[in-house]
Image (cartoon, rainbow, N blue to C red):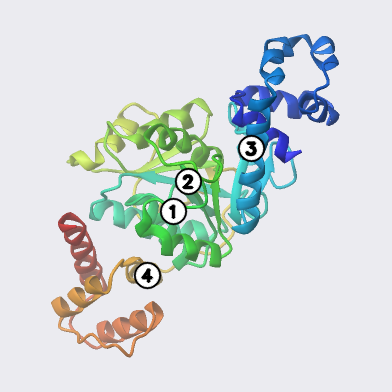
Amino acid sequence: MERYFIALQQLGAKNELLLKIITEYEPTFMNNLFEENSDIFLTNIEWLPYKSLFEDREKVNIALKNADKILKINAEQKIHTALYHTINYPKNLMRIDNPPAIIYYKGANPNEGFDKAIASIGTRKPTRFGFNAINYLIPQWVNEGFAIISGLALGVDRLSHIACLAEDGKTIAVLAHGLDKVYPASNKKLAEQILLCRGTLLSEYPVETEPTKFRFVRRNRLIVGLSKVTVAMECEEKSGSMRSVRFAQKQNCPIFCPSPGNNPTEAQSGLKYILENKIGQEITSGTDYEKVILAAGYKIEKPRMEISYIKQQYLKALIAGSQNENIIKTVFEKIGLQYTSECTCFIDLNNYLLDYIQNSNYSIDAVIKTFIDTIISTEKES
């Protein structure tokens, strides 16, 4: 059955039509459609415009071959296919207007353990404001059993996935291309880590589909659709993130954002716009996490996390998210700590750094700031 739906999509059938077949037609309909049963066009008048298309057997056979190729690659790369209304199709996604009739995913079943979910969206070039918002708020939501949904892009997306994983949470990364690749390539290790930590990579596009601008725009609606609440961590007023906010509005999905303060920079102009226009609600501080949970329709179940613990997790996430060894070496040099090759993983590095902080004049806040400044300056140079 998956083969025929993929082939029909390859023939150019609109998503609305695929959804109609799934929800209104008998399962045998697709078999008859592809097996040259001409009676089907007499008994289903709405299909008459497609009669000439299915009479072109060369086109039909090419579409079937493409579908077979997609399913073959899926099997080789452990990519699963889920049709709308099937057991592994995310229930949250069914709520949106015109949900994709077909989704593809790697890793954990997106319909198991991801119902409590928060979308984290924002700029590809976060400032310290965005780093703080993400790394204070996300651990507290994960502690309450929420999954984090984001887009595996640079910036806020990447930081959100990492902050979730650092707290041993589950995350879904929604991609704007086929799951046979990771874009940007610099996030390949992060994608692998998401899968190792019971997370999911998900896309509405089959393998060998390239990332293009319009697909990123369409991808954003799935990030919102998979979530009960959307949080804009940091974004400009004119940005792709604001498209996600507008989609969340249309879907009546609660919207939140951190308070940008009285003098927001251009990087936070989107947050100012959201609040001034009463599009979303304000998160007043890094410990103001409960209202998002309540808006999602859940109760607070766990005691508040200690600020000292949140900061330790923040530092852990920064180390885990450092894309190259030079960032860590530079930070260590700036705070007067000798880098040692004996620390073979980020957990060793984290413990080594925490021990140093306890026995030196450096506060954890100062070290976190040094890390963020180094990451931002390194990204500007690259």
Q: Which residue is mark 3?
A: 102
* Image coords of residue 314 (percent x, y): 35, 67
Q: Which residue is mark 4?
A: 320
Q: Which residue is mark 2?
A: 175
Q: Quadrant of residue 103?
A: top right
The answer to which of 269 and 108 lies nearer the viewer is 108
The answer to which of 161 and 311 lies nearer the viewer is 161
Q: Residue at x 23, y 42 (%)?
A: 267
Q: Nearer the viewer, mark 4 or mark 3?
A: 3
Q: Are marks 1 and 2 in contact (CB under 8 Å)?
A: yes
Q: Type of residue at label 3?
A: Ile
Q: Are marks 4 and 3 in contact (CB under 8 Å)?
A: no
Residue 336 tag number: none
Q: CA distance from mark 4 to mark 3?
A: 34 Å
- Counting residues from the N terminus, which is met first, the one under dot 1 or under dot 4? 1
Q: Nearer the viewer, mark 1 or mark 2?
A: 1
Q: Type of residue at label 4?
A: Ala
